[in-house]
Amino acid sequence: LAAAAKLYRGVAATLGEVETWANAESGNGGQIELVRIFDHKGLPCRRLQHDIKIKDVRDPFRYLFDRCKLPSGEWKLL
C-alpha cells in the first residue's frame, strides 16, 4: 500500500505517525501507524501496525509487519 510505504520509506517518518487510506469503490479503509523503529542485524527496521476496516464487518482486523532496509535500498519483510 502507498500509505504504508510513506512510513517505512520516508526518512522523516516519526514514531506514532499515522497514514490513512480508503477505497471508495469497495468501502474498505484503514490506518497504518509506525509503532517501532529499530535495528536488526545492523539493518534499519520499522514495525507498522495495520488496522483494516472491511465494509459490513463490525470489528477491524489488526496486523503487525516488520520491514528492514537492505544495503541495496530495498525494504524486505522480516
Image: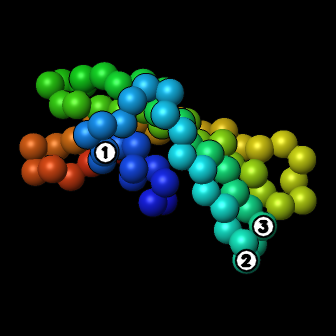
Check disc 2 and give the amino acid type. Answer: Glu
Mark 1, residue position: 10
Query: Does residue 78 appear in this view?
Result: no
Q: Is residue 74 left or right of residue 56?
A: left
**Distance between the alpha carbons at the discs numbered 1 and 3:** 27 Å
Q: Secondary structure at mark 2?
A: loop
Residue 60, visible in the rendered structure = yes
Q: Which mark is residue 27?
A: 3
- The x and y percentages for residue 11 are 26, 40
For residue 25, which numbered disc appears in the image? 2
Q: Marks 2 and 1, how far apart in space?
A: 28 Å
Element class at badge 3: loop
- Residue furthest to the left: 71
Q: Residue at x 90, y 59 (%)?
A: 56
Q: From the image, which quarter does the C terminus lie in?
A: top left
Q: Amino acid at mark 1?
A: Gly
- 3 to 33, vertically: above or below: below
Rendered image: mark on residue 70: none
Residue 35 x %, y %: 49, 27
Q: Nearer the viewer, mark 1 or mark 3?
A: 1
Q: Residue at x 24, y 25 (%)?
A: 40
